[in-house]
Image (tube, rainbow, N blue to C red):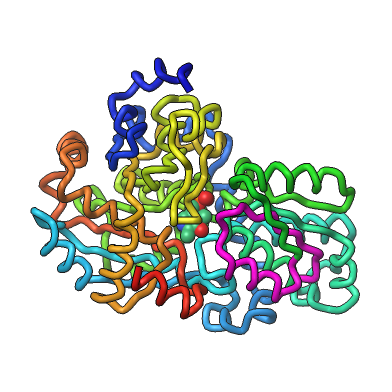
Amino acid sequence: MGNFDGILKKDSVLEQVKQAEEVVWINPEKTSFEDSMQGCGLGQKDIDEAEQRLLRFAPLIQKYFPETQELNGLIESPLVEIPSMKQFLNEKLEGELEGRLLLKEDSHLAIAGSVKARGGIYEVLKHTEDLILEYGLLKTGESYERLGDPDIRQFFGAYTIQVGSTGNLGLSIGIISAVLGYHVIVHMSADAKQWKKELLRSYGVDVREYQGDYGEAVKRGRALSDAGAKSYFVDDENSRNLFMGYSVAGKRLQKQLEEMQINVDEDHPLFVYIPCGVGGAPGGISFGLKHVFQNHVHCFFVEPVQAPCMLLGMATGLNNEISVQDIGLSGKTQADGLAVGRPSAFVGSVMKKMLSGEMTVNDEKLYDYMRNLLDTEGIFLEPSACAAFQGPVCIVNNTKMKQYLAENALTEKMKNAVHIAWATGGSLVPEEIREEYIHL
Ligand SMILES: *Cc1c(COP(=O)(O)O)cnc(C)c1O
């Protein structure tokens, strides 16, 4: 642990991070969108490709998951305004949140009930398309609906998909893979919720549990997958495919904002607050949003005080070469989706000059926000997702945030601002577990 003491001096916020205090960290390396994209290796073309791929699979998705019929087989979530929650926060805070407060309900995404329905499902579909092309499973022009036929399902049955997960990624990969006919193994960390394991088993997924943390589950899963010729491992820490699946959210959100007649431009800044674990979901979503709104969108990640791995990696510049345990934090949190000790180096490098900053939040506050949202708007989110509300709260009462606004000439524009709390999960949480959370 001692050998990291020097590096913690790199940024004064790190001493507080080490003490598990709530902090705001403003990214000193953030530059213009154009500049931030230099040497990134991914871009608009990759986002468009992901979007097209999801369209090709839409008929199949619609066939297997009738709940997606309304959106023609696309997996997308509502964007809703939450004025009562805004009013509640304003009454509680010393100050006023200017502008509008919206909730992006990825908590209600079809199939997996979390943000992982974006990246996870996309990655399995991408792998499936690779197999289709490699083995000529479809004739030219044939609809992907045909993939549901028994002969092709039987073909997929010879292949295994594996993933290490704290819960939600396993749910999304597990469900879609099992439904398509694959053999699936989900390697779960000890802190993964029991109900998530049970739900997966009900789909016929092979769920294996490990005593160590998430990193351990990933390591074992990868090793096992590498040993099998027909096995594919979904690599949460390094996957470009997951990332691109998340990035499609950018244009979709743009359309929803247009439908609500909400402008985002020079005078109407957009702020998004996204709960962060290993970084793929918030990174991919931010990447997509940046391509649409460029310098007018300000992306913030939120992490638990005991597991601020992305903040630590970015602020020290060490990326995945430092873990929260290295500075004496536990990595343990009730926000199971965010219980990650070491960030994705890939996401850290893409976000290096793109991310505006980060907030950290205490576990107890997650439950407060959860109850507040339920009381004011009647919307239930899981604890991980509630981290998003630390964003608007810090905008109002944190001096570093105020400084960020001033330095970016935003202070005067805040009355026109739109804040989006990105609700990353919750709709699949069973009723009895909800009751337990609410009365905690
Ligand atoms: C996975 C997850 C996140 C964070 O995504 P990462 O890709 O791990 O950063 C946030 N909220 C919920 C509910 C999640 O399941």
Q: Quadrant of residue 159?
A: bottom right
Residue 52, how many percent across, how many down? 62, 61
Task: Say whether residue 120 is left or right of residue 393.
Answer: right
Front residue of 372 and 32: 372
Query: How many numbered tags mark residues here?
Result: 0
Front residue of 56 and 215: 215
Residue at 50% x, 61% y: name it.
115
Residue at 43% x, 36% y: name it.
329
- Whether 186 is among the magenta residues is yes
**Residue 288 seen in render:** no
Q: On screen, 112 above or below 162?
A: below
Residue at 20% x, 49% y: name it.
395
Residue 312, how many percent across, how many down? 42, 32
Please give the range of residues in magenta: 180-205
Residue 213, how many percent across, how many down? 59, 46
Task: Say whether residue 37 is left or right of residue 231.
Answer: left
**Residue 169 seen in render:** yes
- Whether 257 is among the magenta residues is no
Q: On screen, 316 above or below 57?
A: above
The quarter in which the C terminus is drawn is: bottom left
Front residue of 222 and 351: 222
Front residue of 134 and 29: 29
Task: Say whether residue 100 is left or right of residue 323.
Answer: left
Q: On screen, 59 above or below 304?
A: below
Residue 109, how many percent across, how many down? 50, 71
Residue at 24% x, 51% y: name it.
269
